[in-house]
Structures are given as structure tokens and as C-alpha cells.
Image (cartoon, helix red, strand yellow):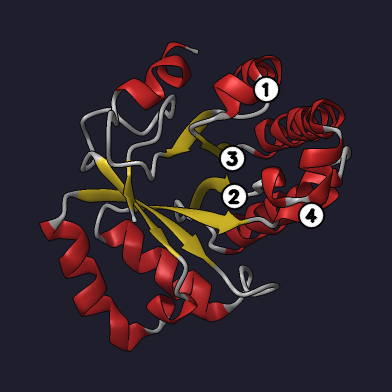
């Protein structure tokens, strides 16, 4: 899934302009590199949002993949999240991933490593979304604010996936998330009609 994230510091002109969500951990295997990075180059992808198996960020396979990505001029973000994380007002699960990412970077000893973490949480898939949406999103925004502070302490960017309908269903929470809960957002704009119109408010924020 190709995407353009809003508000990130990566769009500096030094890297290719597009990002790629990659949920396949197999991509990290060395035998996959030639084909994978060739596709990235052809598609002008400069940032990869890569899913890593739980507990694998500090492993040698992940380290080798990050070194190869750096050699090819590609920034890598750890892609992680689950709807249940939206219930964690302390953002414990997300903070744990951030700290694991920071440890992985330290182990690289001078390599660029992970640029940050992309949080794909989707609390609107929970039962609580229909029961008490306002409280759910207030708690989620509280947690993302804590996670963002921790990311800044660790020197990592934190990007957040959002649907196109937060601006209509929970505008105050969306504004808090953009202002205090992340460094940038990736809008999940699956509706292939009026694509620009559906992200106007998110871009304004």
C-alpha cells in the first residue's frame, strides 16, 4: 500500500517521495532484498513502514535489513499496532515498541537504524467505539500524547494512521492527536472518489 504521510520531516527532497506499508516480515530475509529494493526504486519509495515480528527488532536479521536499507537510501519505520492499544491510556504497548526500536538503533553502533514507529491502532474497530466514542478517543489521545513524548525522548519519529472520518466523528480528538500525539499522520484514504477532498481537513490540521 503506497501512501503519503502528512507532517513528517522526511519529505526533504533527499529521499524518494512515497512510502510503502509492508506487513510481510519475510521481506527482511536477505534473499528477498534484490527484488524488494528494486520495486522500491521503481516506485520512488523512500520510506518503508515495515512490520517486524514481536520481539525481533533487536535481532540480527532486522539489523542486517536496516543496514541494507540505509545503504540504499531508504528510511525504515517499525509498523505496529492493534485496536486494543486504543484502550491503553498509558500507551504501554506502543511505548514498549518505541523503546525496543531505540534499543535496536543503539545496537547498530552508528547506523541510522529505524527512523521511527508507525502506529496503526484503529480504535474504531472496538465495541467501545459504538458505546462511548468520546471517552474512547479522549483516552486514546491521552495515550498517544504520552507515547509521542517518549518518542521525542528516544529520538524517534512517531507517525499515526488515521481514517478519513475522524474529522467528522471526533474532530476534537483528531486535533489533539495531530497537535500533541504524533509527528505526522498517514490517512487511510481507501475511498477512491474525491481523494483530495477527503483529506483536506487532515492536511489543514
Q: Nearer the viewer, residue 62 or 137?
A: 137
Dot 1 corresponds to which residue? 170
Q: Residue at x 16, y 68 (%)?
A: 38
Q: Secondary structure at mark 1?
A: loop
From the viewer's perspective, is residue 121 above or below residue 142? below
CA gap, disc 3 and disc 1: 27 Å
Q: Which mark is residue 120?
A: 2
Residue 128 rendering spot, x and y as whole percentages = 84, 44
**Residues tagged 4 and 3 counted as in contact (Cβ below 8 A):** no
Dot 4 corresponds to which residue? 84
CA gap, disc 3 and disc 2: 16 Å
Q: Pointer 4: residues within 10 angstroms few (<14), some, or many (20+)?
A: some
Q: Secondary structure at mark 3?
A: loop
Q: Earlier in the sequence, mark 3 or mark 1?
A: 3
Q: Residue at x 48, y 76 (%)?
A: 25
Q: Earlier in the sequence, mark 1 or mark 2?
A: 2
Residue 105 rendering spot, x and y as whole percentages = 58, 56
Q: Which mark is residue 156?
A: 3
- Disc 3 or disc 1, which is closer to the eye? 1
- Disc 4 or disc 3, which is closer to the eye? 4
Amino acid at each position: 500500500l503506497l501512501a503519503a504521510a502528512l507532517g513528517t520531516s522526511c519529505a526533504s527532497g533527499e529521499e524518494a517521495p512515497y512510502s510503502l506499508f509492508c506487513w510481510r516480515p519475510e521481506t527482511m530475509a536477505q534473499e528477498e532484498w534484490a527484488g524488494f529494493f528494486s520495486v522500491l526504486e521503481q516506485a520512488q519509495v523512500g520510506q518503508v513502514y515495515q512490520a517486524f515480528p514481536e520481539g525481533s527488532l533487536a535481532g540480527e536479521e532486522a539489523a542486517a535489513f536496516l543496514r541494507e536499507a540505509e545503504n540504499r537510501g531508504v528510511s525504515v519505520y517499525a509498523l505496529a499496532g492493534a485496536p486494543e492499544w486504543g484502550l491503553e491510556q498509558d500507551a504501554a504497548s506502543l511505548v514498549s515498541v518505541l523503546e525496543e526500536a531505540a534499543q535496536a538503533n543503539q545496537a547498530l553502533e552508528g547506523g541510522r537504524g529505524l527512523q521511527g514507529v508507525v502506529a496503526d491502532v484503529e480504535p474504531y474497530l472496538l465495541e467501545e467505539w459504538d458505546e462511548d466514542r468520546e471517552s474512547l478517543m479522549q483516552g486514546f489521545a491521552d495515550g498517544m500524547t504520552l507515547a509521542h513524548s517518549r518518542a521525542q525522548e528516544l529520538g524517534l519519529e512517531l507517525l499515526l494512521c488515521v481514517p478519513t472520518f475522524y474529522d467528522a466523528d471526533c474532530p476534537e480528538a483528531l486535533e489533539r492527536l495531530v497537535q500533541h500525539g504524533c509527528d505526522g499522520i498517514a490517512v487511510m484514504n481507501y475511498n477512491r472518489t474525491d481523494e483530495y477532498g477527503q483529506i483536506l481537513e487532515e492536511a489543514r490540521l
